[in-house]
Amino acid sequence: MSYLGLLKLSSPEAVVVLTALAVLSISLLAKRAASACPFVAALGLVIAIAVVLMLPRHATLFGGMVVISPLNSLFKIICLALAFFTVLLTEAEKAPRPPGEYLALILLATVGLMLLVGSEELLMIFIGLELLGLSLYVLVAFDKSDVRSAEAGLKYFLFGSTSSAFTLFGISLIYGMTGTTGLAAIAVKLVSTSVQPLLAVGIVMALVGFGFKIAAAPFHLWAPDAYQGAPVPSAALIASGSKVASFVVLGKIVLVGFAPVHGNAGWHAMVAGWSPVLAALAALSIVIGNLVALAQSNVRRLLAYSAVAHAGYTLIGFVAGTRDGFSAALFYTTVYAVTLVGAFGVVGVVRRETGGDDFSNFSGLGSRYPLLAGCMAVFMLSLAGIPPLAGFFGKFYLFSAALHGGGNQGLLWLVAFGLVGSFVSLYYYLLVLKAVFVESSIPAARPLDRLPPEIVQQGTVALLAAIVVLLGVMPNVLASRILAAIP
Amino acid sequence: MIAWTIYITFGGAVLLLFVPRGFARWIALLTTIAGLALGVIAFVDTPIADLAHFTTIVRVPWVPALGMNYHLALDGVSLTMVLVTGISAVSTVLFSWDVKDRQNEFFFWLLLVVGGCYGVFLSADLFLLFAFYELVIVPKYFLIAIFGSTNKEYGAMKLTLYSFFGGMFVFVGILVAYVSAGSLDLNELAQFQFSPQLQSWAFPVLFLGFAVLAGVWPLHTWAPTGHAAAPTAGSMLLAGIVMKLGSYAGLRVAMNLFPQGFQMWSKWIAVLAVIGIVYAAAVALRQRDLKFVIGYSSVSHMGFVLLGFATANALGVSGAVLQMFSHGVIAALLFAVAGRMIYRRTHTRELDALSGMNLSHALPFAAFTFVVASAASMGIPGFSGFAAEITILIGAWKTYPLAVSIAGAGMVLVAAFTLRALKQSFFGEKESTVVAVSPNWNEQQSITAPEKLGACMLMLTTLAVGTYPKLLLDRIMPAVETMRFF
């Protein structure tokens, strides 16, 4: 394989890196043009999407280090689109200064996302995780004027680096046992050899790192602070792109690499393997996430705990272990990511206008900005799983796939956890909407310069809400593509 | 054609978001009238023979990978429910004519509820039906929490969570049916033989999930609180049609899909129904708030619907469907009098306070309406309530003679609390002891034209069905007979 061929196949990543460099140089060299930075970044991401579309359908380089397949390309596009919306949200954010560096970091994190999604080899996946992680640590701590941002950055970094260490150790054990780091090759080895305790330890340790990325309990402790303290676009990226990419990779690792040690999480037929482990994580996440979210009075913390619960729902799809389950989990996490970018967009507006993001800051939003309030209602109700929004179809797809996959309704217990969890969640999502629509008092703590939302921000949020409604009314648009892309 | 009831209603709702304030109520009125008109046209046009089967109207692939179709169908039962939805919706808008505050938003939520109800009644795909069913939950919350009265936020949240709680069980039942049969088409599912072991637990899960919305005892407590907290329009819609979503879906989905499970559990449904009838009537007898009286009377009347289902014969079940229609009209009428005609003018619903006002002189039309509504509610012959309840009781006589006698006693209690409410609210004896008429009272606040129109429409409907129940029963009976739970 010549370098030219490699360059051609990794051209989307190259475009994003070049855009990052361009944005950095613009903000350094032409200070006046700094306000154009977000648009340059957005343009670069759009070009990258176009380049992804022009790639060949299938290609494999270096034993799976770079893999191009319909699934990988689809999720590269989704990650790029999520980064695109995140970049649009930075436009209205006051905190991230200088904007060039902030945007460059977002773009580099996006490259990490693309490497993660586009690889089927453990070492490359780890490099992607680290590139993503390092960019995100800085992005979280970027607001130098806010002490909570620094706290969140430190927490995120400490938890992240610890879990990276676990993952790396787990990968080394897996390599030691199987003699390879390619996912497909691992699967072949695992079929022929019996599962030894050391391998089991390796698998569980490798899963810890992903448990951290997707904020599944008990690895979620960083999430509330990061969601609350980070600048809004950083939090949006953590909740959206980072999660989607992690779920795609986690799904590939467990369903391709570890497929032979699936085990069984059915109620009467528990067999050791990774699926009972993920089932336990899922159940724990659903319970902890939903119950703790009930007690929150800050919208961003509430979103963080609900993120834990949603990670739990999504894992149910993997536990099912079928093609349908994988597809349902990916559909769900994509919808979730879109929803959260939008929700953080609204949070950004409210912060900008009232200087905070507690429930009290949201009160009366419905009468001040009906459009944004309506979008917030769409996002919250989609998270709660109310039709005709995308979250409703997502939940139905997930739970039906889980019941199909479990065989003889063995996973009904996990589905029951999910259903009770979403019942509880409606209560706290309604509390947010109650503040938005029912309460009419205007927030007291209001900064002197009251900033109305910008047109870009409003447009982005409205577009995301439209996507959530569209995916709810016509889920086939995305679901059939994901299903077709999964081999 | 009748599918347009759904599109027009949702279209009207979306339109309301964009029009200036003054037009909102007109758009809402036109939308609901169009819906009712489509229902009436279908009622007149469709040959009775076609209504015996759940005949497909629209069927478009939706998510082929999962076997989901956008599939609507019509039979006698769903046509009856579409009609009552249309009638309630029009009268609801008429009784909300003077909503001033956040008018567009009010009618937006209201039309969403109505549209969702049309959707449930016409769906022939399990997923679609469930989507419409859950769609109705959230608009109810906003309708009550924003526009309601007494203790509105508590009532709204309680009602919403109860509905969603029931929805959770429905979700399980639907998933199990879908996964076992591999189809979501209601007609196909109705042919599928589910294993008896599965039916024995899936039926109660599904049926009870739906029955929460129908106000089954002991999961009925959301109904009186919610009805009392809701604005008049909300109570009318809730009692008039939303409660019927639960009973309709229980019949269409739970009983039709799991007939053996139904046979296993039908006597327990009868027990719950009879307890509901007597208990709610007894509680209503002790209420001081007029809306609570009516709220509990709704629970009691819905008990008759469940009793009709439990009989598992064509007569009893048809009577139950007729009762759903009849109660939809009567409950709307009762709430209209209590919430709009009385409360808006006197600012109280306490029976003690009302009894000192001697309202029958001040509001003769309201008094007349309430007398008619009470008579219909008590089951006086000539009104729809009588036709429905007598059909149910005749049906029940064959299977549960004991239940009939207890329910008969319940009917006496219904008469008792209705008469008590009637007497205290309009014909109080304590004349001139308290001149407690609200200070806001003035003579201009006599009953307005839209109110009269709405009330007359509802009264005529209950009278028409009461004197000639064959009009509906001819269409309901064949449809019920083709269901397979006998």
Image (cartoon, coloured by chain):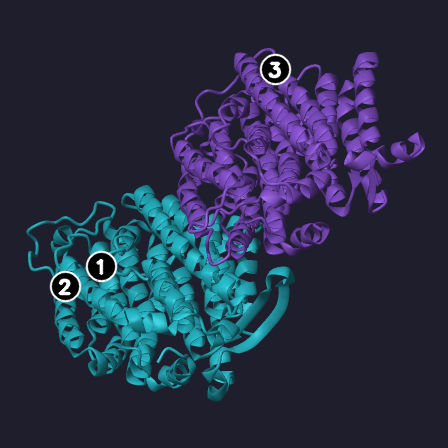
Chain colours: A purple, B cyan
Q: Tell me the quarter of the picture where residue B4 sits.
A: bottom right
Element type at mark 1: helix
Q: Residue B417 carries which label?
A: 2
Q: Say which residue label 1 marks.
A: B296
Q: Select label 1 or label 2 by which is in front.
A: 1
Tell me the distance, in whole angstroms, between the alpha carbons under discs 1 and 3.
57 Å
Using residue A382 as the reference point, say whether residue A183 is left or right of it: right
Residue A43 visible, this orientation: yes
Q: In this view, does B278 lie above or below A334?
A: below
Check disc 3: other Cα within 10 Å, few if <14, some if 14-19, many if 20+.
many
Q: Label 3, secondary structure: give it.
A: loop
Q: Is residue A91 above or below residue A182?
A: above
Residue B217 screen position, x and y as percent: 24, 59
Q: Do the residues labelled 2 and 3 touch (CB within 8 Å)?
A: no
Residue A303: assigned label: none
In the picture shown, does residue A47 fall above or below B163? above
- On the image, the x and y values in percent for residue A55 come to 85, 42
Using the image, name the chain to which the residue with label 3 belongs. A
* Residue bearing mark 3: A143
Please give the chain letter of the residue carrying mark 1: B
Q: Residue shown at 49%/53% (left/top)?
A: B108
What amino acid does circle 2 point to? Phe
Q: Residues within 10 Å of mark 2 (few under 14, many from 20)?
A: many
Chain label for disc 2: B
Q: Which amino acid lies under the numbered mark 3 shown in the image of this protein?
A: Asp
